[in-house]
Image (spheres, rainbow, N blue to C red):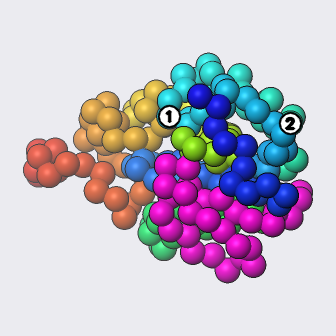
Amino acid sequence: MTLLPYLEADRIEAGCDEVGRGCLAGPVVAAAVILPPTYHNPRIQDSKKLKKVQRESLVQEIKAVALGWAIAEASVAEIDQINILNASFLAMERAIQQLPQVPDHLLIDGNRWKSSLPYSYTCVIKGDGKLASIAAASILAKVYRDELMVRIAQEFPFYGWEQNAGYPTKKHREGIVSHGSCAWHRKSFQLLSPQLSLGLE
């Protein structure tokens, strides 16, 4: 299924999405993408529905055809300080600010958006499965963050981040039990389930 190329014609729309909100470790990463309104690619879908090799093969094409794209992060410290929702907004805001072309309108994946940026916007629930620019943003953010977590895993090999990207898998939590947390863990998150926490006492 080919996703919609735009919400409204005759305006520059930037699709925005983030990845990593549910992780126990690592930054939250966002991307913003402006696609040409005539661009159609049925391979661009919600990044969660694509295999790793499919996402990676699309990254260079998206970057090549996009009128503008940008990727940005909000750090673990920022997540712990302002909470994950606000950190997600911050990462998206940073990505939007880095776009080489000023958008007329933002297409935000999700049901809410908070920003001081002077742009009109539309929140689109499950937008990465409806609009191509949001899906493209989800792909860029996902591949960038996965590659980042693989690099970090080389220094912290206990948690399986090269496979779970910081999400709360069994191996990740077993690593926390065995080796404790590290600087990349979000201290404001419940790193261990109550059962595992009791086992540490």
Q: Earlier in the sequence, mark 1 or mark 2?
A: 1
- Quadrant hosting residue 7: bottom right
User: Residue 15, position in %: x, y?
Assistant: 69, 53
Tell me: residue 73, above or below residue 64: below
**Mark number displayed over residue 190:** none
Q: From the viewer's side, name the closer residue of 189 and 101.
A: 101
User: Residue 10, position in %: x, y?
Assistant: 85, 58
Residue drawn at x 34%, y 59% is 189
Residue drawn at x 80%, y 29% is 61
Does dot 2 land on a helix, a strand or a loop? helix
- Count every numbered label the image shows and give the total: 2
**Mark number displayed over residue 48:** 1
Residue drawn at x 89%, y 57% is 100
Q: Main secondary structure of the magenta part?
A: loop
| Residue 180 in view | yes
Which quadrant of the figure contains the N terminus?
Answer: top right
| Residue 70 in view | no
Q: Which residue is mark 2?
A: 65
- Quadrant hosting residue 155: top right
- Amino acid tagged 1: Lys
- Amino acid tagged 2: Val
- Image-based side of 91 in relation to 172, left or right: right
- Image-based side of 68 in relation to 43, left or right: right
Q: Which residues are magenta?
A: 98-127
Tell me: residue 161, above or below residue 18: above
- Image-based side of 192 in relation to 124, left or right: left
User: Residue 2, position in %: x, y?
Assistant: 65, 31
Q: Is residue 106 magenta?
A: yes
